[in-house]
Image: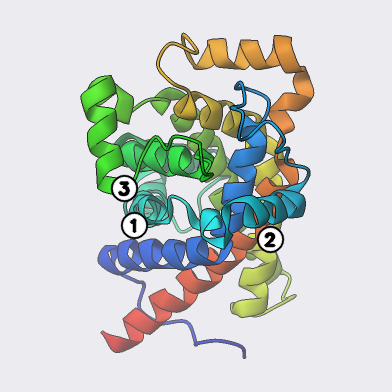
C-alpha cells in the first residue's frame, strides 16, 4: 500500500476544512508559475502595449515562462502568491471541505448520491466559496497580470496596498468585480472537478483496479483536471480579463465575452488552454493527493 491507511472513522468537518485549505496552498506553491503564465496568455491582445512592453509577446506556456524570467526575473512567476494563498485558505476550504457535507444534506444522508445531487452540491459549495473569497481572487489576478519592467508603472506594490487601492478607487464593488462570471466559472469547475474525481475514484475502487491510496488518487485527480479544463476554459478567460480590466473597459462580463468574440474570434476563449490544463491537472494531482493524505494524518493524530 502506498500512503497512509484510510481511517475507520469519517473525518470531521474541521479536519476536512483545514486539510482542504492546506492541500490547496501546497498545490498553489507547486503550480503557481503555470497559473501566472495562463493569466498572461489570457490577457494578451486585450490592451495597448506601452513602449517598454511592445516587443514582448508570449508564445505557449513554457515560452511565456521563459520570456517572463528573461524580461522580469524569476520572481515574476510568483506575482500575487500571497493573495493566491489567502484565496486558497478561504476558497478551497469552503468548496472542497464542505462538499461531502452538502452532498449528504441534499441526499438526505443516503449512502450513495446520484450524479444530479453531486452536481448540485458542487455548484453550491463553488458559489459559496466565490461569494466569500472573491476579493483575494481579484488581487491575485491583477498581480499576475502586472508587468515588472523598468519604465512600466506598477498598479500595486503589495497585497494589502492592492486591497486598499481597489477599495479606495473602485469601491466595495471593485473587490467583488467579476463575481458573477467567477461564480459561473467555479460552479462549473467545482461540480466538474469534484464530481469527476468522485466518479473516477469510485469506478476504480468498484472494479478493484487500485486500492484507495496514492495511485488511485493520482489517476482520479488527473482525469478530473482534463475534463474540468475543457468545460471551464471559456468562462475562465472571460473571468480573468474582466477582473483585470480597468474601470470602464467593459460594461459587464457579457460585454467582455462579446468583445472577445467579435474582435479576436472564438479561439480567444481557449487562450492559455495548455497552461490551464497543465496547471489544473498538476494542481488537482497535488491538491487531491495532499488532501486525502492530510485528512488521514489529522485523523490519526486526533
Q: Mark 3 or mark 1: which is in front?
A: 3
Residue at the location (37% across, 61% down)?
A: 21
Q: Work out how far the residue at label 2 is from the one at label 3, CA to CA, in angstroms.
A: 32 Å
According to the image, label 1 marks what residue? 89
Residues 97 and 152: in front is 152
CB under 8 Å between callouts 3 and 1? no
Q: Residue at x 51, y 37 (%)?
A: 151
* Sooner in the amino-acid sequence: mark 2 or mark 1: 1
At numbered mark 1, what does the secondary structure look like: helix, strand or loop? helix
> In the visual, does 85 lie left or right of 168?
right
Q: What element carries label 3?
A: helix
Q: Is residue 296 above or below residue 20?
A: below
Asked if residue 99 lies left or right of residue 259, the reply is left
Report the residue marked by disc 2: 222
The residue positioned 42% from the left and 48% from the top of the image is: 103
Q: Are marks 2 and 1 in contact (CB under 8 Å)?
A: no
The residue lying toward the viewer, choosing from 232 and 86, is: 86
Which quarter of the image is occupied by the C terminus? bottom left
Which residue lies most toward the bottom here?
A: 1
Query: In terms of sequence position, does the residue under pointer 3 or pointer 1 come before the other?
Result: 1
**Residue at 29 percent of width and 30 percent of height:** 166
Q: Return the residue nearer the eye: 244 or 300.
A: 244
Q: How is the image coloured?
A: rainbow
Look at mark 3 in the image and give the residue it sits on: 159
| Residue 286 drawn at (x, y percent) | 56, 68
**On screen, 28 above or below 228?**
below
- In the picture, measured across the screen, residue 127 lies left or right of residue 28, that is left
Residue 96 image offset from top left, x and y in percent: 42, 54
Q: How far apart are marks 3 and 1 (CA)?
A: 16 Å
Local crowd size for mark 2, using a 10 Å CA cut-off: few (<14), some (14–19), many (≥20): many
Asked if residue 272 can be seen in this view, the reply is yes
Amino acid at each position: 500500500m502506498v500512503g497512509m491507511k484510510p481511517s475507520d472513522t469519517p473525518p470531521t468537518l474541521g479536519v476536512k476544512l483545514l486539510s482542504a485549505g492546506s492541500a490547496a496552498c501546497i498545490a498553489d506553491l507547486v503550480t503557481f508559475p503555470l497559473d501566472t503564465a495562463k493569466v498572461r496568455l489570457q490577457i494578451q491582445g486585450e490592451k495597448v502595449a506601452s513602449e517598454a512592453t511592445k516587443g514582448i509577446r508570449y508564445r505557449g506556456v513554457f515560452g511565456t515562462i521563459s520570456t517572463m524570467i528573461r524580461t522580469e526575473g524569476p520572481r515574476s512567476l510568483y506575482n500575487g502568491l500571497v493573495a493566491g494563498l489567502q484565496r486558497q485558505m478561504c476558497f478551497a476550504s469552503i468548496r472542497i471541505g464542505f462538499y461531502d457535507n452538502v452532498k449528504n444534506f441534499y441526499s438526505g444522508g443516503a449512502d450513495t448520491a446520484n450524479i444530479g445531487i453531486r452536481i448540485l452540491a458542487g455548484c453550491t459549495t463553488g458559489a459559496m466559496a466565490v461569494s466569500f473569497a472573491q476579493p483575494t481572487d481579484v488581487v491575485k489576478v491583477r498581480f499576475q497580470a502586472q508587468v515588472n519592467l523598468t519604465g512600466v508603472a506598477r498598479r500595486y506594490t503589495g497585497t494589502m496596498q492592492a486591497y486598499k487601492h481597489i477599495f479606495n478607487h473602485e469601491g466595495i464593488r471593485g473587490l467583488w468585480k467579476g463575481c458573477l462570471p467567477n461564480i459561473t466559472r467555479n460552479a462549473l469547475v467545482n461540480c466538474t472537478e469534484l464530481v469527476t474525481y468522485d466518479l473516477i475514484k469510485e469506478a476504480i475502487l468498484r472494479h478493484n483496479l487500485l486500492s484507495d491510496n496514492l495511485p488511485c488518487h493520482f489517476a482520479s485527480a488527473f482525469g478530473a483536471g482534463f475534463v474540468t479544463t475543457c468545460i471551464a476554459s471559456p468562462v475562465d478567460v472571460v473571468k480573468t480579463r474582466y477582473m483585470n480590466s480597468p474601470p470602464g473597459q467593459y460594461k459587464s462580463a457579457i460585454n467582455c465575452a462579446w468583445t472577445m468574440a467579435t474582435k479576436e474570434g472564438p479561439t480567444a476563449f481557449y487562450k492559455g488552454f495548455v497552461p490551464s490544463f497543465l496547471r489544473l491537472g498538476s494542481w488537482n494531482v497535488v491538491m487531491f493527493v495532499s488532501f486525502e493524505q492530510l485528512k488521514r494524518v489529522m485523523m490519526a493524530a486526533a
